[in-house]
Image (cartoon, helix red, strand yellow):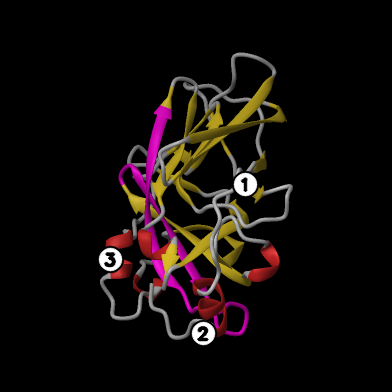
């Protein structure tokens, strides 16, 4: 992440506060859709998906940053060797990280986020709002890449950072797990808390080496009639908070 400006007034205000530790209850709401139904492991169906979450504290305080996310969908899989890859390391190696280095055909989706920059546990009214953009790329075998960016017109800081996402499977669930870098969670003694994010992964169909049509995202069916999604939010102390949502017919 490259930071060009931070609101000095916000930093000074936070530094001048007597921070009191208070009990905090965080609410995690998740949602999503899958554009295709049915399919099996032998005859999968290609499709796309959406994902969203909202994190809040009913008492009106800023919540602590989330360190690790695990986003898992039932009855699906990713074929990460189907299209060109663009690793997070390749993007971040530039003096100013930019997805222009990614090969054609490697982008898989896009989205947006809203964050607070302030002090966790303090009233939301004392924090600054930040709006940013998300771009997702295939990261190569077993990986995807999340690129986070923001502009000074809509955020106190200018962000440009790629995050490596690992493709994982757990029983009937498959999805992506990633850890947010320290520099995207804290700056100049301020906390960066993502309060809402949404993303859409496109339907991508290509021919494999055998000439068969294969989807980057595929539905392989579910044991029951419904498809579930589980998102696990893990904080900086290692405490995990799973949130489950039934997305409807599988």
Classify mark 2: residues with Cα within 10 Å, few (<14), some (14-19) or many (20+): few
Left or right of 127 in this view: 92: left
Q: Please give the residue where the numbered disc 2 appears in the rendered image.
A: 8
Specify the quadrant of the image occupied by residue 183.
bottom left
Question: Where 140 falls versus 135 (above or below)?
Answer: above
Q: Which residues are magenta?
A: 141-169
Magenta stretch, main secondary structure, is: strand
Q: Which residue is mark 1?
A: 51
Separation of residues labelled 3 and 2 (CA atoms): 32 Å
Left-right relation of 235 to 222: left
**Of residues 184 and 24, which is closer to you in this image?**
24
Helix, strand or loop status at disc 3: helix
Q: Nearer the viewer, residue 52 or 179?
A: 179
Give the residue furthest to the top.
223
- Looking at the rendering, in which quadrant would you find the N terminus? bottom left
Which residue is drawn at the image coordinates 50% and 27% (left, top)? 173
- Numbered disc 2: secondary structure: helix
Name the residue tied to disc 3. Answer: 90
- Mark 1 in CB contact with mark 3 (< 8 angstroms): no
**Which residue is at a point 43% across and 25% down the rendered structure image?**
170
């Amino acid at each position: 992440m490259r930071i060009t400006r931070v609101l000095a007034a916000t930093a000074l205000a936070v530094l001048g506060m007597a921070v009191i530790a208070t009990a905090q209850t965080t609410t995690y709401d998740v949602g999503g859709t899958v554009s295709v139904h049915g399919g099996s492991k032998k005859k999968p169906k290609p499709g796309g998906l959406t994902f969203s979450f909202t994190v809040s504290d009913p008492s009106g305080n800023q919540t602590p940053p989330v360190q690790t996310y695990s986003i898992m969908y039932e009855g699906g899989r990713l074929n990460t060797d189907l299209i060109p890859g663009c690793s997070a390391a390749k993007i971040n190696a530039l003096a100013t990280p930019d997805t222009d280095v990614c090969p054609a055909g490697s982008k898989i989706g896009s989205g947006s986020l809203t964050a607070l920059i302030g002090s966790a546990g303090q009233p939301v009214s004392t924090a600054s709002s930040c709006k940013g953009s998300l771009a997702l790329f295939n990261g190569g075998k077993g990986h995807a890449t999340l690129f986070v960016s923001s502009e000074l017109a809509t955020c106190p800081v200018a962000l440009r950072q790629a995050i490596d996402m690992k493709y994982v499977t757990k029983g009937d669930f498959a999805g992506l797990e990633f850890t947010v870098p320290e520099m995207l969670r804290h700056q100049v003694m301020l906390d960066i808390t993502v309060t809402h994010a949404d993303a859409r992964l496109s339907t991508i169909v290509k021919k494999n080496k055998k000439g068969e049509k294969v989807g980057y995202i595929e539905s392989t069916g579910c044991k029951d009639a419904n498809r579930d999604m589980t998102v696990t939010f893990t904080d900086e102390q290692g405490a995990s908070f799973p949130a489950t949502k039934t997305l409807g017919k599988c």
